């Protein structure tokens, strides 16, 4: 089941032509992932206090269309694979029914020393 997160495009998100600057799609999908994790009841501050943080290891991005100033967008996040230390998800940015951006994101759990660690079983079960 996909989590959906609405975003409105503000002037600050656009380039001089009023089109969303390409890197801002990564900001949009990051925000949507954070809201998805929060909606599952996962406390990322508590995880960090216990020495576990999420890091994005890889993003494959496809820019399909353009969003513009004042567009209303919806970002969907759907888990495609969960392992003991990694999450794979697909994220789509839609304007209405049209997908304008798609990304495959690989996230991993790391400790404070930057080494991979296992995702706690109770969190893995939520995903």
Image (cartoon, grey):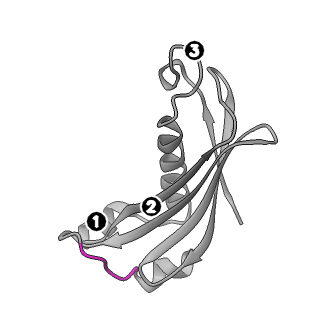
Residue 43 is situated, as x and y percent measured from the top left of the image, at: 40, 64
Please report the residue visible at 62 percent of the width from the left and 60 percent of the height from the top. 90
Tag of residue 58 = 2
Separation (CA) of disc 2 from disc 3? 29 Å
Tag of residue 25 = none
Q: Are the residues flagged by discs 2 and 3 in contact, CB closer than 8 Å? A: no
SS for callout 3: loop
Q: Looking at this view, name the residue that lies furthest to the left.
A: 113
Separation (CA) of disc 1 from disc 2? 21 Å
Please report the residue visible at 24 percent of the width from the left and 75 percent of the height from the top. 115
Main SS of residues in magenta: loop
Tag of residue 48 = 1
Residue nearest the observer in this picture, 105 or 119: 105
Q: Which residue is mark 3?
A: 17
Taking 13 as reference, is 57 left or right?
Answer: left
Where 114 falls versus 63 (above or below)? Answer: below
Q: Which callout, 1 or 2, points at the residue further toward the start of the chain? A: 1
Where 81 falls versus 26 (above or below)? Answer: below
Residue nearest the observer in this picture, 15 or 53: 15
Tell whether position 8 is magenta: no
Q: Which callout, 2 or 3, points at the residue further toward the start of the chain? A: 3
The residues colored magenta run 115-119
Residue 19 is situated, as x and y percent measured from the top left of the image, at: 59, 22
Please report the residue visible at 36 percent of the width from the left and 72 percent of the height from the top. 109
């Amino acid at each position: 089941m996909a989590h959906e997160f609405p975003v409105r495009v503000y002037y600050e998100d656009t380039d001089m032509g009023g089109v969303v600057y390409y890197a801002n799609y990564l900001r949009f999908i990051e925000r949507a992932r954070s809201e998805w994790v929060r909606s599952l009841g996962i406390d990322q501050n508590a995880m960090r206090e216990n020495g576990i943080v999420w890091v994005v290891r890889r993003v494959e991005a496809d820019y399909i269309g353009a969003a513009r100033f004042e567009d209303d967008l919806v970002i969907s996040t759907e888990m495609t694979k969960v392992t003991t230390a990694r999450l794979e998800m697909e994220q789509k940015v839609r304007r209405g029914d049209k997908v304008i951006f798609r990304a495959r994101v690989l996230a991993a759990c790391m400790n404070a020393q930057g080494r991979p660690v296992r995702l706690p079983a109770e969190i893995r079960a939520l995903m």
